[in-house]
Amino acid sequence: MIEDYKNFLKEILIDRSELQARIAELGEEISRDYKGKELLMVCILRGGVFFTVDLMKNVDIPHKVEFMAISSYGAGARESTGDVRITFDLQINIRGKHVLLVEDIIDSGHTLASVIEKLSVQAPASLEICALLDKASRREVDVPIKYRGFNIEDKFVFGYGLDIDDYFRGLPFIGVVDLDKYEPAE
Ligand code: IMP
Ligand code: MG
């Protein structure tokens, strides 16, 4: 079992109301941009799930949602390896659709760069990225982020979809891990 997150929570970086206010703005922007278009949101599991659901509540044009799961880390690692695997693929063809990828965080960029490369061959009408968090200083490959929730510094964060060793995704805020105080469970 993992210990209580309060033991290694350094600070709350973005609280519940800041998250919800920013997501409302993004929803408005997306609703405006995709008006009259067939919008398909693609949630990147598992981290993107809370963001996707709240974003959908704030997009007031008709839209659909699909899910995709990607694995880019070795077990327990905190760095993207660049070895990106689709562990659950889309169940539909996206040809001719306006696809908006919804992701929790862009770090090195390897995960989303690889997803974009894989989906582009299906010839969607458009393919854009909506990321809640952007750790731009960590970028290794360039990815075009159309909608960005927050720029954050290079800190390991958790909550609101983001995990620490697969735990604490359900917290309603984004917290920073104090890596000096966190002991990964064996
Ligand atoms: P990238 O391929 O390096 O851009 O990594 C993106 C993925 O790494 C995200 O989808 C997250 O799952 C994970 N990730 C990156 N930074 C963090 C973090 O600070 N906390 C939790 N997960 C993270
Ligand atoms: Mg993720």
Image (cartoon, rainbow, N blue to C red):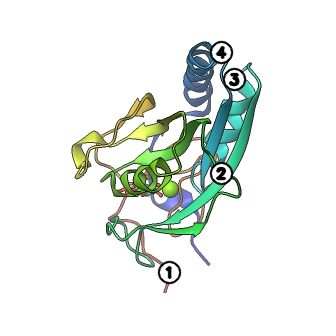
The Cα atoms of the two marked residues, 2 and 3, are separated by 23 Å
Whichever of callouts 2 and 4 sits on the residue coming sooner in the sequence is 4
Which residue is drawn at the image coordinates 62% and 15% (left, top)? 28
Which residue occupies the foreground of this view, 143 or 7?
143
**Corner quadrant of residue 91:** bottom right
Q: Which amino acid lies under the numbered mark 2 shown in the image of this protein?
A: Asn
Q: What residue would you read off at disc 2?
A: 93
Which residue is pictured at 22% across the width and 52% down the height?
140
Circle 3 SS class = loop
Q: Nearer the viewer, mark 2 or mark 3?
A: 2
Q: Amino acid at mark 4?
A: Lys
Element under disc 4 = loop
Contact between marks 4 and 3 (CB within 8 A): the answer is no
Please tell me which of labels 2 and 1 falls first in the chain: 2
Residue that badge 3 annotates: 59
Q: Nearer the viewer, residue 137 or 125?
A: 125
Mark 2 Cα within 10 Å, few/some/many (few <14, many 20+)?
few
Residue that numbered label 1 is attached to: 185
Task: Give the x, y percent position of residue 149.
Answer: 47, 30
N-terminal-most mark, 1 or 3: 3
Spatial CA span between label 4 and label 1: 47 Å
At x 56%, y 16%, the residue is 33
Report the amino acid beneath label 1.
Ala
Q: Work out whether mark 2 precedes mark 3 in sequence or the reverse, and give the earlier one.
A: 3
Q: Nearer the viewer, mark 2 or mark 4?
A: 2
The residue labelled by disc 4 is 35
Q: CA distance from mark 2 to mark 1?
A: 40 Å
Q: Nearer the viewer, residue 121 or 176?
A: 121
